[in-house]
Amino acid sequence: MTDTFRAIRVSKAETGQTAEIVNLTTADLMPPVEGNGDVTVAVDYSTVNYKDGLALTGTAPIIRSFPLIPGIDFAGTVESSSNAGLKAGDRVVLNGYGVGEGHNGGYAQKARVKGDWLVKLPESISTAHAMAIGTAGYTAMLCVLGLEHGGVTPDKGDILVTGAAGGVGSVAIALLSKLGYRVIASTGRASEADYLKGLGAAEIIDRNELSAAGRPLNKERWAGVVDAVGSHTLVNAIAGTRYGGTVTACGLAQGMDLPGSVAPFILRGITLVGIDSVNAPMTKRVEAWSRLAQDLDLKKLDAMTSRVKLADVPALGAEILAGKVRGRIVVDVNA
């Protein structure tokens, strides 16, 4: 077991922030204090999420302390543990909890974290598939659970998925179609129509139908929504939701604002469900990963996934923010 490992480290200077590959030792990680840095993980894979793009580029103040290893999630094998619930050899996944923001994250060959942040992977999900799912796919599953909790079943009507060619959207389409829902995919990339239909989308609409200011209420078109875009897109998605429908909101690709009306809520009884993947309780995390093992078609997951090396990651930050990344990216931190 070597003490030295490779990682991406983001540093900040007067001229801005930089991301570079460095060699570190375990002394650079969270101190192994009981109840805090009580588990060391040999990381196999990480991924690139929209929030990672914000962190890598410095577009938003995601990283709260410098220098820091970014990467908001990872999957690997427990190397050592003083946590009662985990032992060496356990395969685990981590999403959220401020990792890659205030704590060293997943763009490294090793991670030391609080054991209570880790979820044991279901037997049927490999560490590579876990990061093909990643925070984006885990968030998509939380959205599906939100729709189900709201009583939106396949017989109630279509489901709109915005930002459909992105990570959350791609996994959401695959999940929903397997569960029997008819999915309408909203995208700004007309060239991705075949890709989206391959994942299970029944209908493709141009995101421009939703991205500008609209009316408080529109024709009732869908029973539920998975929205990763926010702003006018979310408002128009709400305005087109059927009576009693549920809208899940998990992203802000268009903006953090919500420039809308209370009309859909008080006239159609619409429910808006906020999806928080960062601090979701462990019971919900375990349920989400269990359902992913059960309900996600791994062949569709493979079809939406590309693989890159650790050194490729810094350049991908700007690409994912510009909407140039399709589906999911798995980062092999040991390549």
Image (cartoon, grey):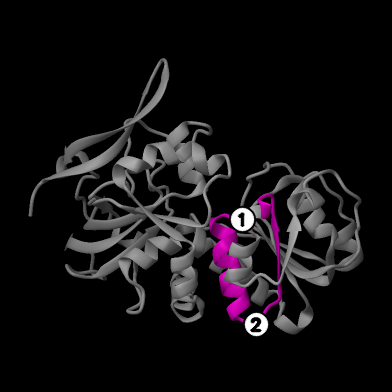
In the image, residue 278 sits, relative to residue 142, either above or below, namely above
**For the residue carrying disc 2, how many other residues have a C-alpha within 10 Å: few (<14), some (14-19), or many (20+)?**
few
Q: Is residue 69 rendered to the left or right of residue 168?
A: left
Identity, as a three-letter code, of the amino acid under mark 2? Gly
Given residues 280 and 184, the one toward you in this image is 184
- Magenta-tinted stretch: 163-190
**For the residue carrying disc 1, how many other residues have a C-alpha within 10 Å: few (<14), some (14-19), or many (20+)?**
many
Percent across and percent down for residue 32 are: 19, 50
Asked if the stretch drawn in magenta spans residue 184, the answer is: yes
- In the picture, the disc for residue 250 is 1
In the image, residue 89 sits, relative to residue 26, either above or below, namely below
Disc 1 to disc 2, how far (Cα)? 22 Å
> Which quarter shows the N terminus?
bottom left
Identity, as a three-letter code, of the amino acid under mark 1? Cys
Residue topped by disc 2: 180
In the image, residue 294 sits, relative to residue 86, either above or below, namely below
In the image, residue 231 sits, relative to residue 12, either above or below, namely below
Given residues 176 and 261, the one toward you in this image is 176
Q: Is residue 160 rendered to the left or right of residue 284?
A: right
Q: Residue furthest left?
A: 1
